[in-house]
Structure formats: C-alpha cells, structure tokens
Image: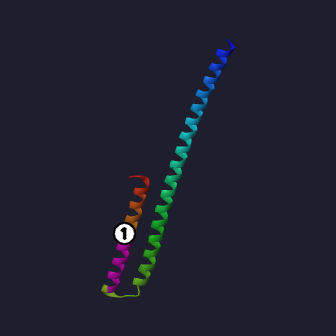
C-alpha cells in the first residue's frame, strides 16, 4: 500500500542522510587534523628558524672576542640554540599529542 511504501521511502531517506552526515563529519575531522598538523609543523619550523637566526647573530658577536672568551661565547650560543631546538621539539610533540 502507498502508506507503507511512503514510510519505507522516508526511512531509507533518513538512513541515507545519516550516512551522508557521518561521512561529512569524518571528512571534516580529517581536514581539521591535517590543518592542526600543518599548524604544528609551521610553528616548529618558525621556532627553529628564529633560533638559528639568533644563533647566527650571537656567533657574529662572539667573533669580536678572542681566545677563551670567544670559545665560551660560542659555546653559550651553541647551547642556547640546542635548548631552543629542544623546546621547539617538545612544543611540537605536546601539540601533536606525542
């Protein structure tokens, strides 16, 4: 009968819409995850690039010194670079949930 067919058609339409919604939600979640990864990678790249720039400037400043002072200055600049890289890596890991 027509009423039964209409009810079946409505039920099928609801099921199709539910599947479509689930697929759209999955696609959205995937896109958001990719965007978060890109954002995290970008922040890491920026932090390490800035650290390298600060290191380069510090090394240039060390070059005006002589002997042990120059070595100590360069060692300090190298240590600061390694610390900044470690901080950037830790921030990336925290942001990505690792």
Depicted 51 relative to depicted 2: above or below: below
Residue 88 image position (x, y, % from top left): 42, 63
Q: Residues within 10 Å of mark 1 (few under 14, many from 20)?
A: few
The picture quadrant where one finds residue 9 is top right
Say what secondary structure mark 1 lies in.
helix
The quarter of the image holding the N terminus is: top right
Q: Position of residue 38 (x, y in %)?
A: 51, 55
Residue beneath the point at 44% across and 81% down? 60
Using residue 74 as the reference point, say whether residue 35 is left or right of it. right
Find disc 1 in the rendering and name its residue: 83
Q: Residue at x 45, y 66 (%)?
A: 48
Displayed quadrant of residue 67: bottom left
Residue 42 lies, in percent from the top left, at: 51, 60
Residue sitting nearer the eye, 44 or 7: 7
**Residue 3 in the image, given as x and y percentages of width and height:** 67, 16
* Residue 46 left/right relative to 79: right
Count the marks: how many? 1
> Magenta region's main secondary structure?
helix
Return the residue found at the far top.
Answer: 1
Q: Where, by quadrant of the figure, is residue 92 drawn? A: bottom left
Q: Residue placed at 37% from the left, 64% from the top?
A: 86
Residue lying at the far left of the rendered structure:
68
Q: Is residue 25 above or below residue 82?
A: above
Q: Answer whether residue 20 is magenta in the image.
A: no
Q: Nearer the viewer, residue 83 or 72?
A: 83
Start-end of magenta stretch: 69-82
- Looking at the image, the residue that sits furthest to the right is 2
Q: Is residue 28 left or right of residue 64?
A: right
Q: Residue at x 61, y 23 (%)?
A: 12
- For the view shown, which residue lies furthest in the front direction? 3
């Amino acid at each position: 009968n027509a009423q039964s067919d209409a009810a079946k058609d409505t039920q099928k339409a609801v099921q199709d819409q539910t599947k479509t919604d689930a697929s759209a939600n999955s696609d959205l979640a995937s896109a958001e995850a990719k965007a978060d990864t890109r954002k995290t990678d970008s922040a890491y790249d920026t932090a390490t690039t800035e650290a390298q720039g600060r290191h380069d400037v510090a090394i240039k400043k060390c070059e005006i010194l002589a002997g042990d002072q120059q070595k100590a200055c360069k060692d300090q600049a190298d240590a600061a670079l390694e610390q900044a890289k470690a901080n950037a890596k830790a921030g990336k890991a925290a942001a990505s949930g690792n």
